[in-house]
Image (cartoon, grey):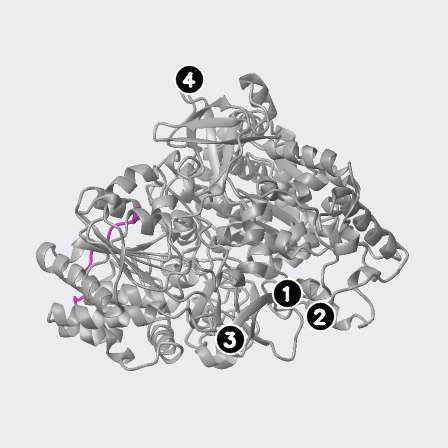
Amino acid sequence: MVQTRRDFLKRTAALSAASYLGMLLPFNSAGEALAADDTVWHRGSCRLCGTGCRLELGVKNGLPTALRGVPESRTNMGFLCMKGMLFWKVMNHTDRLTTPLYRAKKSDKFKKISWDEAMNIAADKFAGAVKEHGPNSVAYYGSGQALTEETYFFQKIFRGGLQTNNVEGNPRLCMASATAGYMTSFGADEPIGGYADIEKADCIFIIGSNMAEAHPVIFRRVMRRKLDNPKVTVINADPRISLTSRIADIHLQFNPGTDLALLNALAYVIIDEKLHNEQFIKDYVAFKKGKEESCDFEEYKKSLADYTPEKAATIMGGKVTADQIREVARKFATSKGTLSMWTMGLNQRKQGVWANNLIHNLHILTGQLLKEGADSLSLTGQPNACGGVREAGGLCHILPGHRPIEKEPLRNQVEEAWGVPKGRIPAEPGLHTMAMFTAVNEGKIKAMWINCTSPVQSLPNCDLYNKGMAKDDTFIVCTDIFPTKTTELAANLVLPTAFHFEKTGVYGCTERRSQITRKAINPPKGARPEVEIIRDWAALLAKKLNDPVITQCIKPFEGLEPEYALPKAIWDEYSQKLTKGRDNDLSGAPYEVLEGMFDGVQWPAPTAEYAKTGGTVKKFVRGMDPLAEKLKTDDKPYQFYGAAHPDHKLWVWLRPQANPAEMPDADYPFYLSTGRIIDHWHTMSITGRIPELLRANPYAYIEINPKDATRLGIKPGDMVEITSRRGTNIMPAKVYEGPIEGMVFAYWHDQHPDRMINKVTIDAIDPGSKQPEFKICACKIKKVSGPQALKPYIT
Amino acid sequence: MRTSFRFTLLLAFLCLVWTCASAQGSEGSASKTGKHPEITEQEKLVACSECHQTATPEVYKQWFDSLHGIGMVKCYQCHGTFENFNVEPAVSVCATCHKKMVEKCPKDQKCWACHKPHSFKRANK
């Protein structure tokens, strides 16, 4: 029966009125998120951002039925966002890949082949490339969504088996600057504190993060803290007023790329008004400039003379006042606990490492660290960028257990753990992500394995790199659960894999917390877990290359069933042999311990007894961190044992304001920035297949400040062309006072060729972290038509 | 700080058309069937809140100012989408995030007996 809006309104009103009167309405009690006798609930983690929300998958008759939060979890306390609530719906989606697909040429159509054929082709191509062109002609490009066991196993085969460090992953695109920031400021990667600081903080400083959409459950904790404690100050610093700004007491809106001036100005005020912590600085701090040249406090203070609040306000574009800068600096320095949080707004920048250093500077100067409610907390974008990629050796310059590859003794430790000859792992770092895809363009990479990610859509300036990936010079294997833009354009061989909860493994989230998800349901027939694929492929490689060392790499895992025993053996090797004694010590957290936790374990956790308490809430604090006691060098309460700082100090860096790689000019007068939308995950190959999520935001659109829109004659819904020096998009306009005047903003999930914004973004990289500057480039915009009806586009 | 959002995309126009068209008749109400009024596939690509900002402004405001509105808990999370739409969400949906509260709640009462729909303020406050 057709229903009218009027009737709907009446019904809605009736529901409201009845509730006001305390009446009960007819109620359908059917649903899946409450325990039902025949539903079994399996605990695991969410895979759709870096928060690490714990949830339970309901399974009935072998099929997924619902997801619900785990109230006892210290990450999400039972709350889920819409993605975490609904991703079970894709598990049995008809688009799931269930058969290996192969095409000799990328212009051919795929044909279905058997797993035996597929594995033989994959092994032939990689072995052939190594034989003919050497080890560095092959490469692995992985994902912050892969399980730790998968990333660890892939890199073991590439480094120990094939003898190349061409091991990279999409965390290079999101977290590399945070890693370099922590290493250079604190001497060790990953944060000192964690989410527990949110409920203790009196000042929360958010910069370069629209956490309301990118990390909604963390945002919920911040919202709750603010609403329950109105005296808590929330500051949001961003060129764009976003949904995160709704809870902010102060929004600092500035021209993109001028936040280094802001952060230096805050330091200026802190020192000028003597709000810095002199004793903390005396006890724990060194000052550095350039690459690593020592200086002193006075030189640092002098360097800030260019960042008086008045000067910074001018640099930032004039919307922020000098008095606001002073007010923020005072609150930052004098609150009982100040917690900073940021994500891609600082990281995806040509000066990303510097921006990270500058925010750490503020915490070091004020001593807003190492105590309740105080931390400098980088929010991770993906569920396992920290645990799998940063910790388990998923980037070209690091080995498992936070071991820099250039250190021979550390390479030898890994070789010994693997039982492979000394010198087997090459000493030279491999190609970082943008260099790797440049090498693909140049035809230097002959065989590449892309796992659980879609670089065709997610690389900056993607058209440039897609030309290389589309060529037949590079044989590309893709392991994934759905077709993507990358399987469509670049793959020769597509291998269908098991999805989350269809396999077993560990994710490590933002706050050094490792959490296990056990297999709960079978994958679709024909799909396999990656660990099984890697093992079988490596066995064939060993034969084709006649190399017993490759056999040695898989020897501990031979014959193990892939659902549990195989990933457990991989985790055991990694955690017991390669994290033991390292700063990310997880040797106290084997599967048996992780499975007993509602949430997981924060490293360092060197013993099972300690891990069962939840692990280390604050690093470097004696009495809270077992390594701080074990590695102490004096009697002070804080011990900075990070291997990158031999002086055991925190380092304050002199970092000047520096422009982005590309500034607006007469030809390209606007700043372009991009970001996530709450309903979708990355390239929407998962969330675009969930009707509720697809309909909520089926397309990308371009946000334009009303003053700019008026000047250019653009009305809401008009189709707007966005052009940079690299490419063009056309998408509908959303006109609202979000982006600062002179800036436009686009979400990046849309797969449609007209609306894939990474055709427009820039591939300039931070010289230290090698992370691209997705967040800022120059563009021009113009109206091309009035509103048009659009259709969602999913490959 | 509260941000003023102006959601006026192309499809707001479609919403207006639907609003006007719907106002012409009142047969087959949602109250009787619990279903969403029929709309086209294209109209289904409009976010719920965009239409309801106009269609049910009082409900929209209650939601927007509520913890759900600030915390970005959207309409479809409780009410579903068109194929599984429920005017009255099942309590079990609330349990997705509020499992312990639902378990504590008397079995003969629904969440909104105490928490006003959309504003989620307790009725006695």
Residue drawn at the location 42% of the way across and 35% of the way down = A754
Chain at numbered mark 4: A
Q: Which residue is mark 4?
A: A666
CB contact under 8 Å: marks 1 and 4: no
Along the line of sight, the residue nearer the viewer: B42 or A274: B42
Q: Which residue is mark 2?
A: B100
Badge 1 or badge 4: first in the primary sequence: 1
Chain at numbered mark 1: A
- Residues in magenta, as a range: A423-433
Q: In the figure, A24 relative to A39: above or below?
A: above
**Same chain assignment for discs 3 and 1:** yes
Q: Secondary structure at mark 3?
A: loop
Q: Does A386 sit left or right of A448 as displayed?
A: right
Q: Amino acid at mark 4?
A: Ala
Q: Which residue is mark 1?
A: A78
Along the line of sight, the residue nearer the viewer: A1 or A537: A1
CB contact under 8 Å: marks 1 and 2: yes
